[in-house]
C-alpha cells in the first residue's frame, strides 16, 4: 500500500494545510484587549452628509400619505399631468414620497427630495426621504 515515505509526506502535508488554514484565518487583532493601529471608523447613515443629487420637482398629487412629485421644467407643465401622470413614469420623472399627516404640502409646490434609496416599483417610492421646500 503506502510506504513509510508516502505516509510521512501525507502527514506533513495535512499538518501544513491544517495549520495554515487555522492560523491564516485568525485575525491579527482577535484579542479584544489589543487595538489595531489602523482601525477604521464606521459612521451611520445619519452621520454622513447627503451627497446624492436631489429629485427636484413639483407636487402634482397628494393622496393617502404620499406626495406625487413630477420632475418638469415648470409648475404649469407639472400641473398638466396632475390627473394623468403615468406618461411621466416611463421617463423616470415621477417619484412618490411618503409623508406624515402633520406635514402640509400644496399642489404645485416645488421640492427637493433626498432619499436613502428608491423602491423598484413603478413609480418608485422614496425610502426615508428628506424633503426640502424651495421658494420660487
Image (spheres, helix red, strand yellow):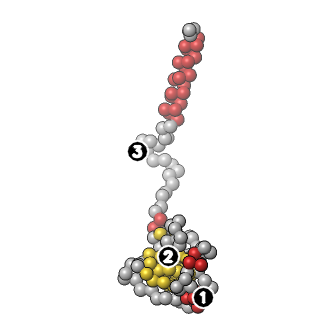
Nearer the N terminus, badge 1 or badge 2?
Answer: 1
What's the mark number on residue 35? none
Mark 2 — residue? Answer: 96
Residue 129: image location, x then y, percent: 47, 73
Asked if residue 119 shows in the view, the reply is yes
Mark 3 — residue? Answer: 32
Q: Are marks 1 and 3 in contact (CB under 8 Å)?
A: no
| Label 2 Cα crowd, 10 Å radius (few <14 / some 14-19 / many 20+) | many
C-alpha gap between disc 3 and disc 2: 47 Å
Rendered view: 119 above or below 20: below
Mark 1 — residue? Answer: 77
Front position among marks 3 and 2? 2
Q: Residue at x 49, y 32 (%)?
A: 22
Q: Secondary structure at mark 3?
A: loop
Q: Are marks 3 and 2 in contact (CB under 8 Å)?
A: no
Q: Residue at x 56, y 91 (%)?
A: 136
Q: Secondary structure at mark 2?
A: strand
Residue 39: image location, x then y, percent: 50, 52
Asked if residue 110 shows in the view, the reply is no
Q: Secondary structure at mark 1?
A: helix
Q: Residue at x 41, y 78 (%)?
A: 65
Numbered-mark total = 3
Residue 69: image location, x then y, percent: 52, 80
Q: Residue at x 53, y 18 (%)?
A: 11
C-alpha gap between disc 1 and disc 2: 18 Å
Q: Quadrant of the N terminus?
A: top right
Amino acid at each position: 500500500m503506502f510506504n513509510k515515505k508516502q505516509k510521512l509526506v501525507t502527514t506533513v502535508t495535512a499538518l501544513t494545510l491544517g495549520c495554515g488554514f487555522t492560523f491564516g484565518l485568525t485575525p491579527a487583532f482577535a484579542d479584544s484587549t489589543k487595538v489595531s493601529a489602523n482601525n477604521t471608523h464606521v459612521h451611520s447613515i445619519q452621520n454622513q452628509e447627503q451627497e446624492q443629487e436631489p429629485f427636484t420637482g413639483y407636487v402634482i398629487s397628494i393622496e393617502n400619505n404620499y406626495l406625487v412629485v413630477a420632475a418638469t421644467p415648470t409648475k404649469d407643465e407639472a400641473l398638466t399631468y396632475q390627473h394623468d401622470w403615468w406618461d411621466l413614469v416611463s421617463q423616470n420623472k415621477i417619484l412618490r414620497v411618503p409623508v406624515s399627516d402633520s406635514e402640509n404640502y400644496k399642489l404645485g409646490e416645488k421640492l427637493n427630495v433626498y432619499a436613502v434609496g428608491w423602491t423598484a416599483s413603478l413609480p418608485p417610492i422614496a425610502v426615508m426621504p428628506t424633503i426640502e421646500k424651495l421658494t420660487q
